[in-house]
Amino acid sequence: MNKTQLLEILEEWNFWKKELDTGKKRDKYLVQSLSFLKPNVVLTIIGLRRSGKSYLMKQIAKELTERGVAKDEILIVNLEDRRFFERDIKLLDQIFETYLEVLKPKTKPYIFLDEIQKIPQWERWVRTFHELNKAKIIVSGSSAKLLYGELATVLTGRHLDVVVFPLSFKEFLMFKGLDIKDKLDLIAKRIEIKGFFNEYLEFGGFPEVVLNEDKTQLLLTYFDDILTKDIEKRYNLRKTEKLRTLARFYLTNISNPISFNSLKKFLEISPNTVEKFSSYLEEAYLIFFVNKFSYKLKEQEKAARKVYSSDIGLAKAIGFRFTENKGFAAENIVALELKRKQSQNLSMDIYYWRDLQGHEVDFLVKEGLKVTKLFQVCWNLDNFKTKEREIKSLIKASKELKVNNLLIITEDYESEETINKKKIKFIPLWKWLLEEE
């Protein structure tokens, strides 16, 4: 590729000669990212494909220009651009040399490398540039391996990380043009909020899905792209049908406990292959697992793990169901919200709890060494026996773990009740999601 061709591509992705569409601001991520732009640190932005990483990078760049950074001191490179035929370290060198020659930045530039995992051995290039102090580097990718494998090996302690998720419910409402300022707004706009929540429960929070009409088709395309681009091509998988069957199985069985051994017969592959494929799906942020709580690590590892989708819309579009189970969907949304919080609080861990008698609590939150919260998700409390069962399990876990922050998340029931000297708060899911923000 000659310099003229390369420059034409780069001009499309940068602010040098025009303004770019930076999308709707997601302030939490933008503020966090800007606070991480420190000397001698590489900023890493990771998360599920199509969750908004590329727009976040452009928003950071735009904010830098508004703070006085010259536009020619910012270089944005989308490494998924199809016109980059040969993706290797030489391409990165050529891009940077062309940029320096043509733009001639007067100070150390900011380099944004989007979907960096497309370049083999990219981490060594980043380390060299970082150590030589040639640029301030921001990278993004759609694989957790970016963080915990490749980059960690060469930049231990020298990178700060932002994990981007599909829209939270509050962000979803903002994208829909509904701003919730305070608790009075919650009351005044309750009917409108609940209407939007039904859409969120059905189609999830991918930004483009929220803003488009053909939601299901987009979700089907995303699922295929995640498997093809972030797993099959990345790991050079040939027999992909087993991977795809496993992915569909997980998205069909959200909020359920799963063991690798139980899947070997279903898929007719070894437990090791099930585990390997599951790790690929998790690294690509398609799914995540929640372990059973135990003070003994060995027991945690042995027990079945509960599986959740990183976007409820994906589970609804891909999962195979005869009937709709809103309870499982609601539990998945709670799990995802807790996962968002965990990404902002590194001392926080999420588990489910179950005793030998079969009493179960959907979520247990541990912060540091202390268990701080217990959650049940019970969509419909009209059935007295169901309500009694959920409360009994919650109280039993509360006594055993010495936890008093007890919550039951519901479809629409709201109350506060004291049972067996334990205060339990009941709150609708839509309201909990907005209050948690």
Image: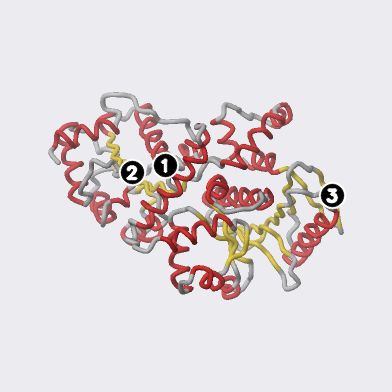
Check disc 2 and give the amino acid type: Asp
Depth check: give the residue in front, 347 or 27: 27
SS at mark 3? strand
Q: Earlier in the sequence, mark 3 or mark 2?
A: 2
- Contact flag, marks 1 and 2 (Cβ < 8 Å): yes
Q: Nearer the viewer, mark 3 or mark 2?
A: 2
Residue 105 % position (x, y) = 21, 33
Amino acid tagged 3: Glu
Dot 2: few (<14), some (14–19), or many (≥20) neighbours within 10 Å?
Answer: many
Numbered label attached to residue 308: none
Residue bearing mark 3? 417
Separation (CA) of disc 3 from disc 1: 42 Å
Judge whether 286 appears above or below 106 on screen. below
Q: Position of residue 28 (x, y in %)?
A: 51, 38
The residue at which mark 1 appears reads as 53
The residue mark sitting in front, 3 or 1, is 1
User: Disc 2 marks which residue?
Assistant: 114
> Position of 48 compared to 259: left or right?
left
Q: Are marks 3 and 2 in contact (CB under 8 Å)?
A: no
- Label 3 vs label 2: CA separation? 50 Å
